[in-house]
């Protein structure tokens, strides 16, 4: 399956994850700060927020309707520890995994 074909599945996959009650946050940093990120309602609720409140608290903005992330064009991938550090720095200082 090509990257393009996989990217077409992204929106339906996010919908399935959200409706199944799984919390999901996607943070994108390509070296110039956050470009896009995604948090579903389940993940926002874990922190006691709506998605809009969580976005405002994290200084994030909604991506345009129809946005499609393509990891095939992403030149940098974060390690688990780098992701944890970003969460502590920008979202939840007392985050522990």
Image (spheres, helix red, strand yellow):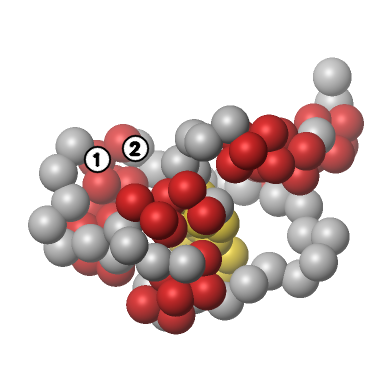
Which residue in the protein does label 2 denote? 79
Nearest the viewer among 79 and 91 is: 91
- In the image, taking residue 78 as reference, residue 47 lies left or right, namely left
User: Quadrant of the rendered structure where residue 6 is?
Assistant: top right
Nearest the viewer among 70 and 57 is: 57
Q: Which mark is residue 81?
A: 1
**Residue at screen point 49% across, 35% down:** 22
Nearest the viewer among 93 and 28 is: 93
2 and 1 marks in contact (CB < 8 Å): yes
The correct choice, above or below, for 46 with respect to 77 in the image is below
SS class, disc 2? loop
**Residue at screen point 54% across, 60% down:** 37
The correct choice, above or below, for 34 with respect to 87 in the image is below
In percent of width and height, residue 13 lies at 71, 34
State the quadrant of the C terminus: top left
In percent of width and height, residue 34 lies at 48, 68
Distance, label 2 to label 1, CA atoms, is: 5 Å
In percent of width and height, residue 2 lies at 85, 26
């Amino acid at each position: 399956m090509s990257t393009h074909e996989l990217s077409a599945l992204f929106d339906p996959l996010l919908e399935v994850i959200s409706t199944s009650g799984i919390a999901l946050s996607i943070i994108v940093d390509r070296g110039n700060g956050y470009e896009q990120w995604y948090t579903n309602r389940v993940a926002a609720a874990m922190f006691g927020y709506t998605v809009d409140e969580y976005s405002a608290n994290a200084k994030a903005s909604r991506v345009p309707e129809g946005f499609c992330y393509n990891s095939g064009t992403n030149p940098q991938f974060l390690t688990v520890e780098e992701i944890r550090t970003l969460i502590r720095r920008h979202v939840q200082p007392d985050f522990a995994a």
